[in-house]
């Protein structure tokens, strides 16, 4: 799996070599040997290369956010989060392809879709855990959304247990109490607050 175009050698960064230890359709585990701007001697680091992803904050007409509750095997828990998914179509997706994936993931995981004349607002991207992976996630605010006639149609591999609407005050309390604890949702919430889409 190649690295994203947003993660590349420049400004004094130089990849000396890379040894792949494991590869699957979703990720590659490798040891990269890199010379950095601050270190002249090459440094080895274990890296998980992952495809980019989208994270969506669906917002209804009455200002309720739509979240899913999904079992997450790595942490042995079911947690509430914004819908999200990997971008599988191409290594370097363009803006149109990214938006298409965002709308599809929202529809499949929540059963909600944009109403006529609604907007899908791009909020940039972030790196989910840059200490060990180059995964980046594109943020979107979808407003307004409504439940579709078809309902949710998520993949069988996804253990989505529930989907509900939450007001910003309730969601804020869930974050404060640690009920919301995944980096995607917390980071998108922070971006929404920072841009003035919601108020802390």
Image (cartoon, helix red, strand yellow):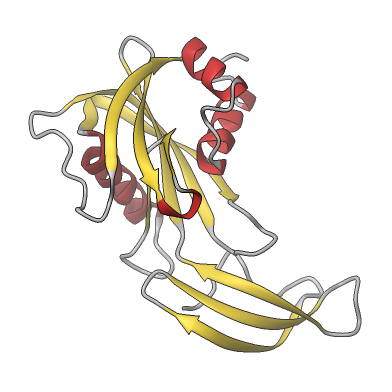
User: What residue sits 59% from the left and 20% below the top?
Assistant: 196
Give the percent coordinates (x, y) of residue 150: 8, 34
As drawn, the residue found furthest toward the front would be 76
Asked whether, in this view, residue 129 is left or right of residue 33, the answer is left
User: Does the image show residue 175?
Assistant: yes
Residue 136, above or below 113: below
Give the percent coordinates (x, y) of residue 77: 44, 42
User: What residue sits 16% from the left and 43% below the top?
Assistant: 153
User: Does the image show residue 4?
Assistant: no
Give the percent coordinates (x, y) of residue 38: 91, 71
Residue 135, above or below 47: above
Numbered marks: total: 0
Residue 5, above or below 70: below
User: What residue sits 57% from the left and 24% below the top?
Assistant: 175
Asked whether, in this view, residue 37 is left or right of residue 84, the answer is right
Give the percent coordinates (x, y) of residue 200: 63, 15
Q: Quadrant of residue 46?
A: bottom right
User: What residue sits 58% from the left and 51% below the top?
Assistant: 128
Q: Quadrant of residue 15?
A: bottom right
Asked whether, in this view, residue 130 is left or right of residue 139, the answer is right
């Amino acid at each position: 799996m190649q690295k994203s175009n947003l993660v590349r050698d420049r400004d004094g960064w130089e990849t000396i070599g890379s040894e792949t230890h494991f590869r699957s359709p979703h990720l590659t585990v490798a040891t990269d040997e890199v010379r950095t701007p601050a270190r002249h001697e090459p440094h080895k680091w274990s890296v998980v290369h992952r495809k980019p992803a989208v994270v969506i904050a669906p917002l209804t007409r009455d200002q309720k956010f739509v979240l899913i509750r999904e079992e997450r095997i790595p942490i042995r828990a079911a947690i509430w989060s914004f819908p999200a998914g990997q971008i599988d179509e191409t290594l370097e997706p363009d803006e149109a392809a990214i938006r298409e994936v965002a709308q599809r993931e929202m529809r499949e995981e929540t059963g909600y879709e944009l109403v006529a004349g609604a907007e899908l607002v791009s909020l940039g991207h972030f790196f989910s855990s840059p200490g060990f992976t180059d995964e980046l996630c594109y943020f979107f605010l979808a407003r307004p959304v409504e439940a579709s006639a078809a309902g949710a149609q998520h993949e069988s591999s996804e253990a989505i247990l529930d989907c509900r609407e939450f007001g910003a005050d309730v969601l804020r309390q869930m974050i404060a109490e640690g009920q919301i604890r995944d980096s995607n949702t917390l980071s998108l919430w922070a971006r929404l607050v920072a841009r003035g889409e919601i108020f802390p």
